[in-house]
Image (cartoon, helix red, strand yellow):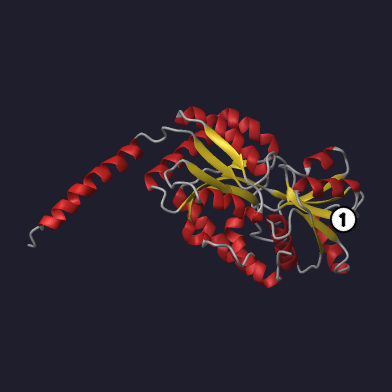
Amino acid sequence: MRQPTRRGLLGAALAAPALVRSASAQSDWPKAPIRWVVAFAAGGAADTVARNLAVRLTEILGQQVIIENRTGGNAVVAANVVLQAPRDGYTFLIDAANQITNPYLIKDVQFDYETTWMPVTQLSIFPQVVAVKHDFPAKTIQEYIAMAKAKPGTVSYGTPPAAGMGHLAGEALQSQAGIKLIHVPYRGGADAARDIGAGAVDSVIITSSSIRPPVAAGRARVLAVTSLKRAAIMPDVPTLAESGLPGFDMNDWNGLFAAAGTPAPLIARMQAAVAEACKDAKVRERLDPSGAELVANTPAEFAAWIKGQRTLLGKLINEAGIKLN
């Protein structure tokens, strides 16, 4: 057996205090406020979920969870803010499909999404809907598809924004149903909802939350939801999957990410805290009207789901030739 050398013993002695400090720092985490950097604007779906969870997480963790909105660059601005912070479990990123689609859409991103980010947990999903203006002739999703088949390239659909989950759901719908629609991109769901209410676009694919105002005003009708299961917020609306497109499942979503190098034990503890917050009745009561369905899966489950989505959405983007202007 090789005997330890004097140099080896000295190195171990010098390293030991650092290991003790690292273990101590993790054991008393958190001992300062935690930042959640949200890649989307205040008042949006991801921000709403983040702020509601942050209230309960502050109670659970004993430290304030601060929400910081950093928009721009297809979520790259927020990502860079987090990457510039110490990787000590005090700064996290809230992102969405950009984690999957940006590598296919942006050529000059300065980091590799697969190796730079560690999935912590999926926070929520937002079922999307296919809705039409109030006087559109189709009364069902089957009639909508039949109309689009009869007159290819005449039915318009709006989504927020180009290359977002609504746009991708629209491309998947066209591919599976064998139809051709006219895509109209909007900056946000509220803009698309405004135009469907005004009758400026034939249809939209937006979240169940965004469609509520024009539906409540009698200016739009929901034909189907894009999630695999019916949405809790509108249980009487059929899914595309049960309407002739088996397996169709294209939700909007958001999740929590940490920069690579963040200690795994702290990621596990953050996920556990989020899972506890998601079970809170008051949190769910506040978020239910928005249509948000809380998830809080494990880092391994979230990572596996993202891996599958990269394959699915990458193929969809390439086949449809989707590009950012």
Is 64 situated above or below 39?
A: above
Is 62 situated above or below 24?
A: above
User: Which residue is at a point 84% across and 67% down the rendered structure image?
Assistant: 149
Left or right, 296 with reference to 45: left
Which quadrant of the structure image shows residue 233?
Answer: top right
Image position, residue 94 (x, y; %): 57, 46
For residue 167, say whether it is visible. yes
Image position, residue 305 (x, y; %): 52, 56
Q: Quadrant of the N terminus?
A: bottom left
Left or right, 321 with reference to 80: right
Image position, residue 265 (x, y; %): 37, 44
Of 222 and 283, the residue lying toward us: 283
Left or right, 307 with reference to 244: left
Image position, residue 62 (x, y; %): 45, 28
Q: Quadrant of the C terminus?
A: bottom right
Left or right, 209 with reference to 96: right
The residue type indicated by label 1 comes to Asp
Which quadrant of the structure image shows residue 316?
Answer: bottom right
User: Which residue is at a point 57% across and 35% down the rendered structure image?
Assistant: 53
Of 319 and 54, the residue lying toward us: 54
Is 142 situated above or below 273?
A: below
Check disc 1: other Cα within 10 Å, few if <14, some if 14-19, many if 20+: many
User: Which residue is at a point 47% across and 36% down the rendered structure image?
Assistant: 273
Element at label 1: loop
Which quadrant of the structure image shows residue 208?
Answer: top right
Give the labeled residue for mark 1.
202
For residue 97, say whether it is visible. no
Of 123 and 225, the residue lying toward us: 123
Q: How many numbered circles are shown? A: 1
